[in-house]
Image (cartoon, grey):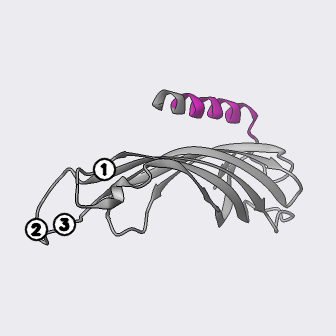
Amino acid sequence: MKKAVYLFVFTLLLIVSSNGYSQFKDYSIKGGVQFNPLMPFSEFDSKFSFIGRGFVDFELTNTLALELGAGYGQYVTEDNFNPHGTAVVDHDKEVKANLIPIDARLKITPWSGTKSSWNPYFYIGAGLLNFDVTETPDVTVSPQYSELQSGWTGFVPAGIGTEIKMSKNVLLD
């Protein structure tokens, strides 16, 4: 599975690097790679989790673009459930899940007519997330681990951002 993910990311980078243009105007196609830490809101103790994403951005009009993306991430947390209420230290309470997001976003750039070195935008889209729980604690009193261990779910990516021109062919997003 890891080899397939690495091959996909390498292929995507090869395609993007050979065809990507980073101008604010008339780019027709551009792409890139994103990496973010995950900061989940949960009743469990958070550990370092991440998600990486590659994307290709197609210019539709001067103010609209369609962005297609896919990635890989890992969610790691520690289940601190203790049914007896005693302070027991157990290092085998990690919960790990692999995440594979696939999404499409409509990117709106209302101020694309200005000539400057930065380009603010907002986006909204739809996506699917494949999750696969690979590690759970060996706890028999907690029923939540008998629930769904892998599958697909939907999500709605939405946000704001800005592009900053670093050079003729490089943007910081």
Tell which tag, 2 or 3, sits nearer the viewer: 3
Q: Are marks 2 and 3 in contact (CB under 8 Å)?
A: yes
Position of 65 compared to 48: left or right? Answer: right
**Residue at x 73%, y 59% (from the top left corner):** 117
Asked whether 19 falls inside the magenta stretch, the response is: yes
Q: Amino acid at mark 1?
A: Thr
Asked whether 24 falls inside the magenta stretch, the response is: no
- The picture places residue 171, in percent across and down from the top left corner, at 67, 50
Distance from disc 1 to disc 3, alpha carbons, whole Å, reads 15 Å
Q: Are marks 1 and 3 in contact (CB under 8 Å)?
A: no
- The picture places residue 68, in percent across and down from the top left corner, at 71, 47
The answer to whether residue 160 is above or below residue 11 is below
Q: Which tag, 1 or 3, sits closer to the chain's start?
A: 3
Residue denoted by label 2: 87
Q: Amino acid at mark 2?
A: Ala
- The picture places residue 13, in percent across and down from the top left corner, at 63, 34
The answer to whether residue 82 is above or below residue 38 is below
**Residue at x 64%, y 34% (from the top left corner):** 12
Position of 82 compared to 125: left or right? Answer: left
**Residue at x 66%, y 46% (from the top left corner):** 69
Give the residues drawn in magenta, as a range.
6-20
Residue denoted by label 1: 136
Q: Is residue 169 visible?
A: no
Residue denoted by label 3: 82
Distance from disc 1 to disc 2, alpha carbons, whole Å, reads 20 Å
Distance from disc 2 to disc 3, alpha carbons, whole Å, reads 8 Å
Q: Which tag, 2 or 3, sits closer to the chain's start?
A: 3
Q: Nearer the viewer, residue 168 or 129?
A: 129
